[in-house]
């Protein structure tokens, strides 16, 4: 394809809004106040850890039966719907706890238990990770402001199985560097999914993601990885988002897992807040993440966390 002489033919445009900043702000997120735990009606079936706080030590099988996959397809649809509903509420001024309330109600309305609630003691129904927060941010009194980016990580438990999906949303007018980050993180997830089919190794997924992110000048977080999923929130499979020859498990039809790369504008090194959950970049640079739950099919992959009519929050950002 040849390049058109765009700059030569373009006429000057009237600037109606302030120009978008090029550089991303660094750091500044601090812990807010965490509200009371939300109640789930008795009529909603709950995973065992909802009471005890501890998921069972036993790890599920790597491949799932067609019957479990059919149930996971429904849970995946519902998780996708909840993520779209909470994502639509992202706007300057709302608190992350306000988003948690929406996720909680949206889950219950669909006869789902919000899987994060009391998982290893997690106090809320949703993970909300703003700017330099890498993952597992706890919804609190923090108010979103214009220019923020926020990842919403929704997992629901329905009919005995989990569906896990997340996306990063822009709050108002966001600087160019952060837009690049969000766009490329979504692309890294899609490249990882495109690598999935029977016979490939888990490290092929990691390589696809890492090559994509590094090619865009971005970092890949190593401490958090994708996971097997089904009757358990986190099953036995480990899906690294970078190449490691030891990740040599061969994919087989019926394997169900997530891919959920966390990609950084600066160094991917992390540190933990004292709450034991919130992971942030050490250098304060921004981080984005996207996640889908999928099943390996006979000839490729089926993404489960899409609505029944094929919509996903991940694709909301397609025009970015
Ligand atoms: N949804 C997250 C994941 O993708 C896990 C959240 S665990 C919680 O694996 F306890 F923080 F909710
Ligand atoms: Co998740
Ligand atoms: Co996950």
Image (cartoon, rainbow, N blue to C red):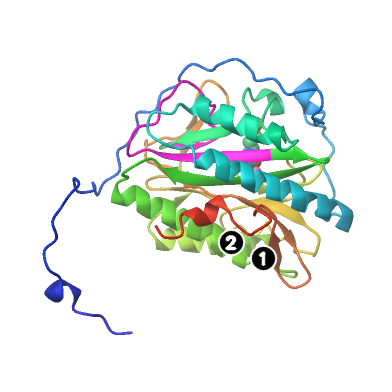
Pointer 1 residue: 196
* Quarter of the image where one finds residue 294: bottom right
Q: Does mark 1 have its CB less than 8 Å from ligand 3? A: no
Residue 16 is left or right of residue 251, and the answer is left
Identity of the residue drawn at 52% across and 20% down: 274
Q: At which x and y percent is residue 290? A: 54, 49
Residue 144 counted in the magenta span:
yes
Q: Nearer the viewer, residue 59 or 86?
A: 86
Q: Which residues are magenta?
A: 132-155
Distance Cα–Cα, label 1 vs label 2: 7 Å
Image quarter in which the C terminus is found: bottom left
- Coordinates of residue 114 in the picture (x, y in percent): 69, 33
Residue drawn at the location 79% of the way across and 29% of the way down: 44
Residue at 50%, 22% in the rendered image: 140
**Does the magenta segment cover residue 165?**
no
Left/right of residue 41 with respect to residue 10 in the rendered view: right
Ligand 1: which quarter? top right
List x then y, in percent, for residue 99: 52, 31
| Above or below, comparing residue 42 to residue 3 in the picture | above
Q: Secondary structure at mark 2?
A: helix
- Tags 1 and 2 touching, CB below 8 Å: yes
> In the image, residue 13 lies at what x, y percent?
14, 60
Identity of the residue drawn at 34% across and 42% down: 172
Q: Counting other residues with Cα less than 10 Å from the Cα at mark 1, is it few (<14), some (14-19), or many (20 or more)?
A: many
Secondary structure found at label 1: loop
**Residue 231 appears in the figure:** yes
Mark 2 highlights which residue?
A: 192
């Amino acid at each position: 394809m040849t390049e058109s002489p765009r700059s030569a033919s373009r006429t000057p445009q009237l600037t109606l809004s302030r120009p978008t900043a090029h550089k991303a702000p660094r750091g500044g997120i601090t812990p807010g106040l965490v509200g009371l735990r939300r109640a789930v009606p008795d009529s909603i079936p709950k995973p065992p850890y909802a009471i005890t706080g501890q998921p069972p030590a036993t790890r599920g099988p790597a491949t799932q039966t067609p019957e479990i996959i059919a149930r996971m397809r429904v849970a995946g649809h519902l998780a996708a719907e909840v993520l779209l509903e909470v994502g639509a509420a992202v706007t300057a001024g709302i608190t992350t706890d306000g988003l948690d309330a929406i996720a909680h109600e949206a889950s219950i309305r669909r006869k789902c238990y919000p899987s994060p609630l009391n998982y290893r003691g997690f106090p809320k129904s949703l993970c909300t990770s703003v700017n330099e927060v890498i993952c597992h941010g706890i919804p609190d009194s923090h108010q979103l402001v214009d220019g923020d980016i926020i990842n919403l990580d929704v997992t629901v438990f329905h009919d005995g199985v989990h569906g896990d999906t997340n996306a990063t949303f822009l709050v108002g007018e966001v600087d160019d560097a952060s837009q690049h980050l969000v766009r490329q993180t979504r692309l890294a997830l899609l490249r990882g999914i495109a690598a999935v089919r029977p016979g490939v190794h888990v490290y092929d997924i990691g390589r696809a993601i890492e090559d994509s992110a590094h090619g865009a000048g971005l970092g890949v977080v190593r401490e958090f990885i994708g996971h097997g999923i089904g009757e358990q929130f986190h099953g036995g499979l480990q899906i690294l988002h970078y190449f490691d020859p030891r990740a040599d498990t061969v994919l087989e039809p019926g394997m169900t897992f997530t891919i959920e790369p966390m990609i950084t504008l600066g160094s991917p090194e992390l540190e933990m807040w004292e709450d034991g959950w919130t992971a942030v970049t050490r250098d304060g640079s921004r981080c984005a993440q996207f996640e889908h739950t999928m099943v390996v099919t006979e000839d490729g992959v089926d993404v489960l966390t899409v609505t029944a009519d094929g919509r996903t929050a991940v694709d909301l950002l397609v025009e970015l």
